[in-house]
Amino acid sequence: MAPHAGLQCPATIDRRSCVRLFIGLLGVLSLGPASGASEGSLAAAQLGTWLQHIGPDRLGDAAALSRLGAIYLAAHPGEQQPEHLSRLILGDSAAPVESVLIERIAQNWSMHDVTQVEGWVLSRTEARICAAVHLLGR
């Protein structure tokens, strides 16, 4: 299936860049509490605060993540409110943000809850994280 034909992306994301983005994302998530006690203990409802605290650049190329997020949000306009997006990503969990993200991504893949963005198949949570990075950068 081809990317959404009606969307204009200022720059495409090549395979190597996308792999680097998601390796960076997984690397940050795998750091967990070792990367700083305050990062892991932030309330799950505060995804924006967590992203600002760790810095989107630690997830990978923030500009590329934001482009993917913009494309995802254009296809899912009901998820454009940061608070709603945070609830969709993290639910009501009080667990550390990193733990919830890893769990949700694994659940998405096991349940085949995936989406296609810019020709890439991403777990729904990965695409929503990109969307959150986009909203944070606006």
Image (spheres, rainbow, N blue to C red):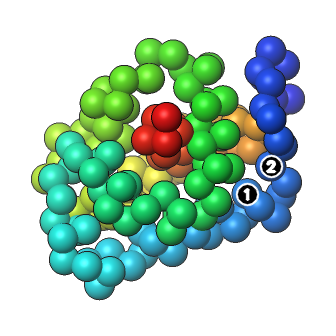
Q: Using the image as rendered, state which of residue 87 and residue 64 is in the foreground.
A: 64
Point 60% across, 43% down: residue: 66
Q: Position of residue 4 (x, y in %)?
A: 78, 22
Q: CA distance from mark 1 to mark 2?
A: 6 Å
Label disc, if present, on residue 18 of the rendered structure: 1
Residue 111, placed above or below residue 75: below
Point 15% across, 53% down: residue: 43
The answer to whether residue 9 is visible is yes
Q: Identify the residue position indicated by label 2 in the image.
A: 13
Point 32% across, 62% down: residue: 53
Label disc, if present, on residue 82 of the rendered structure: none
Check disc 2 and report its element: helix, strand or loop.
loop
Q: Position of residue 117 (x, y in %)?
A: 70, 36
Q: Which amino acid type is marked by label 1?
A: Cys
- Mark 1–mark 2 CB contact (< 8 Å): yes
Q: Which amino acid type is marked by label 2?
A: Ile
Whichever of callouts 1 and 2 sits on the residue coming sooner in the sequence is: 2
- In terms of image quadrants, where is residue 42? bottom left
Q: Using the image as rendered, state which of residue 82 and residue 90 is in the foreground.
A: 82
Q: If the image is split into quadrants, where does the N terminus sit?
A: top right
In this rendering, position of residue 49 left or right of residue 75: left
Q: Position of residue 40 (x, y in %)?
A: 23, 68
Q: Position of residue 84 (x, y in %)?
A: 31, 27
The answer to whether residue 124 is visible is no
Check disc 1 and report its element: helix, strand or loop.
helix
Q: Around disc 1, counting alpha carbons within 10 Å, would you say few (fewer than 14), some (14 to 19), or many (20 or more)?
A: some
- In terms of image quadrants, where is residue 30? bottom left
Point 80% across, 49% down: residue: 13
- Extreme residue toward the front, this view: 138
